[in-house]
Image (tube, helix red, strand yellow):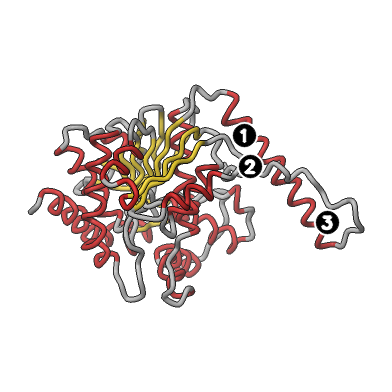
């Protein structure tokens, strides 16, 4: 199991010059571990790197975009990082650019650059990460978000079609169950749709399922895997704890509680922030994690497999669905099936169908102007 990359050049420095307390000793061991991991990831990325990659983050001044841009700046596969938003991006770019990693950073905004801002941010990009849009607020459903975010995503994807038609597109903007179909139909209208290169980022559901499962059973989080299938909203999120590894016994009540907590993870964060924010930091991490997977696959690394929401025929009757997907240089290489499901999981799959179909159709209708 792969943890995320972090590069801390000074992490090798320890606290041995003064008398250590137990807490300090623990901190020293942590720093040593981080330093070792950073070197491993840096070597893994760069030893076989074929070239540098141009990455754009759209919505880069927002709550998800800022930390996502920070994390992508730390990715050794990235040589050009372009940050775009309606306003405020030059300041974000200036801040991020001071980090001592090799990626060159440029900020673009509509306020400062007009229509050329988005065009220049996207020109010849290899990967575009799109967290743009408004966050979910207390009492707001993902369907409410649709009315605002659908138009934003459509406009940004049109610009991608015109300026980087061969880029991998990672859609974070909610509701993903609808915004990915919007993106697909928009790209079709532009004559550049490649189903292998359009992804709905459902990685946060996987990250949550892994974390909750590991905490519940006392497992090492970094070594846990839990597939999550379906979509990216409420009951359409279906973690498959029967397929989790390492295998740990779960009671029916535990499975139900873990499933519901994974499905309601976003609501949990919104409530905890008392209406002053949503799941921005964990979403940024998940977005950067999936972006890293796309770059590693594009760079030729074998065996890159992630759960993601793509055009799929795995489940009859739904055009888009999330399962494990093998990634390659050109995007999707193989879409894996759901695997054997328990009765509980099958009921969850059956129960999500109506909502998922409606969300997909809603996105398609919007893009077609229906």
Examine the rendering and report whether any part of residue 347 can be seen.
no
Judging from the image, what secondary structure is the residue with disc 3 in? helix
Taking the spot 42% from the left edge, 41% from the top edge, the residue there is 82
**10 Å neighbourhood of mark 1: few (<14), some, or many (≥20)?**
some
Q: CA distance from mark 2 to mark 3?
A: 21 Å
Q: Report the residue marked by disc 2.
A: 7
Taking the spot 33% from the left edge, 62% from the top edge, the residue there is 134
Examine the rendering and report whether any part of residue 203 can be seen.
yes
Q: Report the residue marked by disc 1.
A: 42
**10 Å neighbourhood of mark 2: few (<14), some, or many (≥20)?**
many
Q: Is residue 352 above or below residue 119?
A: below
**10 Å neighbourhood of mark 3: few (<14), some, or many (≥20)?**
some
Q: Position of residue 114 (x, y in %)?
A: 28, 47
Taking the spot 43% from the left edge, 63% from the top edge, the residue there is 259
Q: Is residue 154 shown left or right of residue 13? A: left
Q: Report the residue marked by disc 3.
A: 25
Q: Point out the tag, 3 or 1, that comes first from the N-terminus.
A: 3
Marks 1/2 in contact by CB < 8 Å: the verdict is yes
- Taking depth in this image into account, of 316 and 68 the one nearest to the observer is 68
Q: In the image as oriented, which residue stretches furthest toward the front?
A: 112
Name the image quarter holding residue 332.
Answer: top left
Q: Is residue 112 shown left or right of residue 158? A: right
Q: Is residue 252 above or below residue 330?
A: below
Judging from the image, what secondary structure is the residue with disc 1 in? helix
Judging from the image, what secondary structure is the residue with disc 2 in? loop
Q: Is residue 305 shown left or right of residue 26? A: left
């Amino acid at each position: 199991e792969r943890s995320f990359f972090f590069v801390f050049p000074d992490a090798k420095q320890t606290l041995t010059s003064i008398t250590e307390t137990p807490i300090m000793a623990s901190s020293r061991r942590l720093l040593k571990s981080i330093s070792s991991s950073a070197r491993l990831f840096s070597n893994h990325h760069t030893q076989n790197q074929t070239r540098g990659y141009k990455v754009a983050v759209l919505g880069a001044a927002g709550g998800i975009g800022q930390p996502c841009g920070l994390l992508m700046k730390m990715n050794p596969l990235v040589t050009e990082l372009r940050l775009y938003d309606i306003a405020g991006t030059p300041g974000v770019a200036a801040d991020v650019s001071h980090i001592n990693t090799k990626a060159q950073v440029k900020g673009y905004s509509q306020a400062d650059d007009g229509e050329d801002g988005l065009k220049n941010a996207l020109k010849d990009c290899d990967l575009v990460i799109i967290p743009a849009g408004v966050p979910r607020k207390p009492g707001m459903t993902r369907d409410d978000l649709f009315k605002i975010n659908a138009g934003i995503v459509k406009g940004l994807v049109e610009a991608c079609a015109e300026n980087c038609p061969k880029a991998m597109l990672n859609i974070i903007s909610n509701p993903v169950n609808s915004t990915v179909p919007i993106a697909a139909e928009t790209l079709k209208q532009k004559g550049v749709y490649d189903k292998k290169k359009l992804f709905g980022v459902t990685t946060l559901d996987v990250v949550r399922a892994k974390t909750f499962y590991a905490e519940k059973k006392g497992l090492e989080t970094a070594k846990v895997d839990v597939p999550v299938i379906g979509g990216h909203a409420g009951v359409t999120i279906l973690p498959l704890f029967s397929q989790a590894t390492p295998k740990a016994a779960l009671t029916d009540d535990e499975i139900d509680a873990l499933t519901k907590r994974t499905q309601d993870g976003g609501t949990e964060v919104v409530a905890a922030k008392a209406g002053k924010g949503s799941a921005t930091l964990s979403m940024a991490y998940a977005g950067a994690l999936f972006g890293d997977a796309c770059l590693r696959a594009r760079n030729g690394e074998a065996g890159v497999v992630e759960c993601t929401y793509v055009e799929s025929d795995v489940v009859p009757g739904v055009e888009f669905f999330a399962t494990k997907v093998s990634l390659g240089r050109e995007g999707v290489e193989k879409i894996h099936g759901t695997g054997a499901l328990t009765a509980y999981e099958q009921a969850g799959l059956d129960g999500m169908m109506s909502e998922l179909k409606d969300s997909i159709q809603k996105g398609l209708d919007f893009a077609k102007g229906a």
